[in-house]
Every structure is written in structure tokens, then in C-alpha cells.
Amino acid sequence: MDISSFSHHCNVLFDKAIEDYHKMEPADAAYTSYTNPYPDHSLDNVLFKKSRIDTLQWHLEDKIRDPEIEPAEALRIKRRIDALNQERTNVVEQLDLMFYRKFSGAPRLPDASINTETPAWAMDRLSILALKIYHMQIEAHRENSPLAPVCKNKLEILTEQRKDLSRAIDQLLADLKTGKKTMKLYKQMKMYNDPLLNPVLYEKGN
């Protein structure tokens, strides 16, 4: 892992994963039978999985807002979105574990601080930004769209945001490597997906 240009590597991978998804015929938002092109258990494999989950969820979020959608279909999609949210959290935590293992042996300076977010959660934002940029580009160049000028301005802001976030991620990784910062692993501790912790679910069993 070349941490000096790691964000660039992620941006290239995310962009390609998104473009490849949209080349599918049809580009089905519920499509899940895909082949991960990267070796099992590799960092790129997990990054690709992260991008695919985000892309699937993006299109499902669009679809569920159809005012003419059938209630049963809306419920099915909502359940799928809920499942993807949990998958997303699991993948981010898997990424953070990989980063933790990489930097756990780094020397820690006496005044080392903890960052406001972990590397993987920062990369979660980077993955979402890639999707926003991809779709904003479409809207910025859509013919006869009254919002095209507004979308072009938003696209510039998103592009600048990605540059800033990319630099921040690379700096965070550099600080972890040199011991200026340290990281801890905290699980999200989501309760609503657990039938033993969600009162709406466990009270039905009583």
C-alpha cells in the first residue's frame, strides 16, 4: 500500500467500479450477481465491494422515490436498502481492521492524537463522492435540462471536495505511519437490525 497516493488509487478504483456497473445490460439496481475482479481478502477486493454496495444503494434510493411505486415493491426495496446499510457498515469495519493491523506496529509519539474519524469511514465518504460526481456529470450535461448550469457548479464543488478529502486521507495515513496519530477500532453497535436488541422485534416473540 503506497500511502502517499492511496486516495488516488481509491478514486481510480471507485470510478472504474461505478462505470462498469453502468455498462451492465440492463443496469438493474437490484443486480447482485457480480464478479469481484480482485483477489479474495485483498484490500482492493474490499474497496470494490464497498463501491458496489454504495452504487446498488444509490439506485435503490432513486427507485423507491417513484411516486407510482407499488407498496409491496417499495417495502421490498426498503428491506434491501436496510440490508445494504448493514453490509456497508460491515465492509467499512473490515477495512478499518486492515488499516489497524497495518499501523499497529508503528511507533507512537507521546502526543499522538486520535483522528475524528477512522481511515475507512473517511474512505466511505470518498466512495459516496465518486457516485455524486458520476451522476452530477450526467445531469450537468443532460440536454434541455433547466438545472444543467446549477449542476455544473455543483460538480465543481464536488470535485474540489474530493481533492480536499483525498489530501486529508493521505495525510491521515502518513500521520498513522509516523505515529503522529493513532487509531482505535470502534464497532457501530447498530441495534435495530438485531432481533435480540430491537424491542419491536423481540417483543413479538413474547
Image (tube, rainbow, N blue to C red):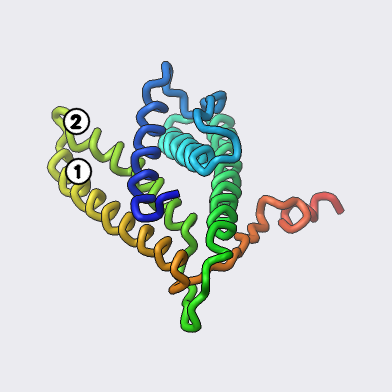
Amino acid at dot 2: Arg
Whether 114 is drawn above or below 151: the answer is below
Assess disc 2: are there few (<14), some (14-19) or many (≥20) residues with their C-alpha within 10 Å of its C-alpha: few
Q: Is residue 123 visible?
A: yes
Amino acid at dot 1: Cys
**In the image, which disc is placed on residue 173?**
none
Kindly state the secondary structure of the residue where label 2 is placed.
Answer: loop
Q: Is residue 65 visible?
A: no
Q: Is residue 117 left or right of residue 98?
A: left
Q: Is residue 74 left or right of residue 130?
A: right
Residue 15: % across, % down: 35, 37
**In the image, which disc is placed on residue 151?**
1
Whether 89 is drawn above or below 18: the answer is below
Nearer to us in this view, 26 or 105: 105
Circles 1, 2 touching at the beta carbon (< 8 Å) = yes
Q: Which residue appears at 32% of the width and 57% of the height?
A: 165
Kindly state the secondary structure of the residue where label 1 is placed.
Answer: helix
Residue 156: % across, % down: 18, 49
Whether 176 is drawn above or below 120: the answer is below
Whether 142 is drawn above or below 99: the answer is above
Residue 180: % across, % down: 44, 74
Assess disc 1: are there few (<14), some (14-19) or many (≥20) residues with their C-alpha within 10 Å of its C-alpha: many
Q: Which residue appears at 78% of the width and 55% of the height?
A: 196
Q: Quadrant of residue 184?
A: bottom right
Q: CA distance from mark 1 to mark 2?
A: 10 Å
In this figure, which residue is indicated by the disc labeled 2?
142
Residue 38: % across, % down: 51, 32
Q: Quadrant of residue 23?
A: top left
